[in-house]
Image (cartoon, rainbow, N blue to C red):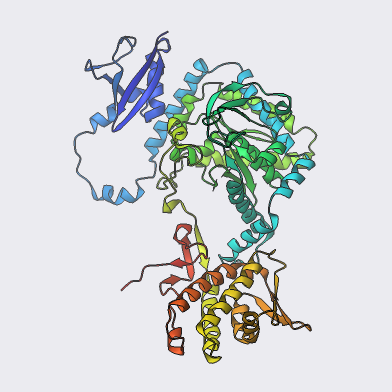
Amino acid sequence: MVARKFQVRHNDADFVVDYDTDDGFETLKFQLFSLTSVVPDDQKIIALDENRVLSDDSDLISVSERLRLVSVNDEVNEQPQPQSSSHVAGNDAASLMTDEELARILQAEEEVLMLQLHFAGGSTKYFEKQIRPDIDKVRMYEDPVYQQAARKTAPVDELEEKALVALAKEGNFEPSKVEQDHAFLLQLLFWFKKSFRWVNAPPCVVCGSETIYDDMGSPNDSESQYGASQVELYWCKICLKSTRFPRYNDPLKLLETRSGRCGEWANCFTLYCRAFGYESRLILDFRDHVWTECFSQLLGRWMHLDPCEGVYDKPLLYEKGWKKNLNYAIAISKDGVCDVTKRYTRKWHEVLPRRNIITEPALSALLATMTQECRRGISSQVLSELDKRDHMEREALERDLHSTDDASISLPGRQSGDKEWRKSRLELGSDSLSSSSCPVRKCVDEHVTRIYNAFCPVLSQFVKEENPKIKAIKALEFLQKILMDLKNTPFKLRKASIDSASNTIQAIVHQLLPSFAELLNALSLKSKAEPDGKVDICLAGDPVKTSLGLPVVLDALDDVIQNLKKIDNFVEDSLSLPLLKLNRIHSGFVRASGEELPVGIVVGLCMK
């Protein structure tokens, strides 16, 4: 056997192919097929340095490493053809796969499956060894102690508020439980992305300085107790002390450390999903990544969630964004083990040649056996529902496999992890989602207009009462503080008090409360006088409307205060402040990328 590394040029792309010469020329052609989609029968491989075409009889040990691959069909079609009107009209449908293209791909897949029977390992032991530890891991998620610990560490009230506000921005103030659950899951994902820490190299445990990787070590007893089978050792650049980074597998321990890489992230996040009642499974990518899937009752299907990236329902993220060469993506849950690779690829004909650990029939049999083990003791009714869902999922995976619906969507490269590390893994890609990747949603923000308009009587009252500008500014700043205090309290229990006897500014605010009525009403708030002279500001209706309006009014107050500070003469004519954006879109459908933070206002182009 001689190991070769070929540099292969195809069209405008370059590929590096690692090849064992004992495997034969046909295997090389299938490797090239997996990279370029040019089926073996159509391949013409040229050794550039010798300027000759390779064949079955070519000496692949001595041939030059620089190769060029062309398709026989491309050579035939190199002569320019006149464009017919039907061809021009067909540009809009360029992403659609023709029957002939689909037939060729299916034929190529059959050929790869035949080849797989000869080259794939016959033993299931290695494959099973990769999956068994994660089966044990997902069983931990069902422990009531683990679930309770997870719920205690999550800001449930805050996540519920954000979920309801997200629905309210679409005009849905009375969502169903299914809609609320779906929105809550997304907020759980976004919160987890911010609360968990990615570890490139741990800080020094002695002085907190940067560390450099040194070696692998053996876990001690306390580390082994929490499933750390691997320990990375680092040394400090400053004090030269050693720091240990145990790779914990116990999700309960990860609730404490809240740090790690993709394995720890997905492990801990999946526990959170189970703790809040979502049917969840861990997705093990054999090309070194892990993520989560949850069954969305709203969508009626399993939904992809990557906690490391903070991305959801973008299953082609890895193949299209990261340029990842997938082979196996295995879903593991308390209810079974499933091969979901087809959800994450639109290049199945390229993935198949890389699936050489085990034959497809042997893989199906192994996963079926594992699933039966997981479902022992389940009632016949529940078992029937699970079997029905499995059948529907298999049909959906096959149906979507050759879909081109998402051909125009641009997905980002990997965002988590050190840049050099991502670069070494060839997962950089682009930096961010394209606008076409952002979800389109209904935008409703009439509340913004109500809030902005409600400032007019407030400012008019300041002038009418002949309050100096400085007092008006101080009064607005005091109101701003009250509203900020309200914003920072639990959204269903919001309440604040004004004591007119405390100081002059509070007394002014107390005096001007009637002019604030319209503003409070726009925020679904009200004022209530108490016998002791205090005035309570509390909820008047739907707390979600208050949550929706508070960021807007606080942002508007900033504008008003800054504009008042610039005014020299505090009179009626000076109150025409540029609060409202004239090109604001307050209804319709928009992409999330078009919204302004933090208020979520959408603006459009002013057309003349």
Please report the residue visible at 32 percent of the width from the left and 25 percent of the height from the top: 42
Tell whether 438 sits left or right of 461. left
Q: Is residue 64 above or below residue 323?
A: above
Residue 454 visible in rendering? no
Tell me which residue sits at (63%, 82%) in the image. 504
Residue 483 is situated, as x and y percent measured from the top left of the image, at: 62, 71
Residue 578 seen by the camera? yes
Q: Quadrant where the C terminus lies?
A: bottom left
Residue occupying the point 43% across, 35% down: 323
**Residue 243: quadrant of the picture:** top right
- Count of numbered badges drawn on the protein: 0
Residue 108 versus residue 126: which sits nearer the camera? 126
Whether residue 105 sits left or right of residue 373 in the image: it is: left
Q: Position of residue 588 (x, y in %)?
A: 48, 67
Q: Is residue 59 above or below residue 567?
A: above
The spot of residue 523 in percent (x, y) is: 61, 74
Nearest the camera: 148 or 67?
Answer: 148
In depth, the one of 289 and 589 nearer the eye is 289
Above or below — where is 324 with respect to 150?
above
State which quarter of the image contains the N terminus. Answer: top left
Instruction: Please name the residue shown 67% across and 23% down the image.
Output: 219
Q: Where residue 359 sits in the image (x, y, percent)?
A: 56, 21
Left or right: where does residue 516 sit relative to residue 577? right
Q: Quadrant of the rendered structure where residue 365 is?
A: top right
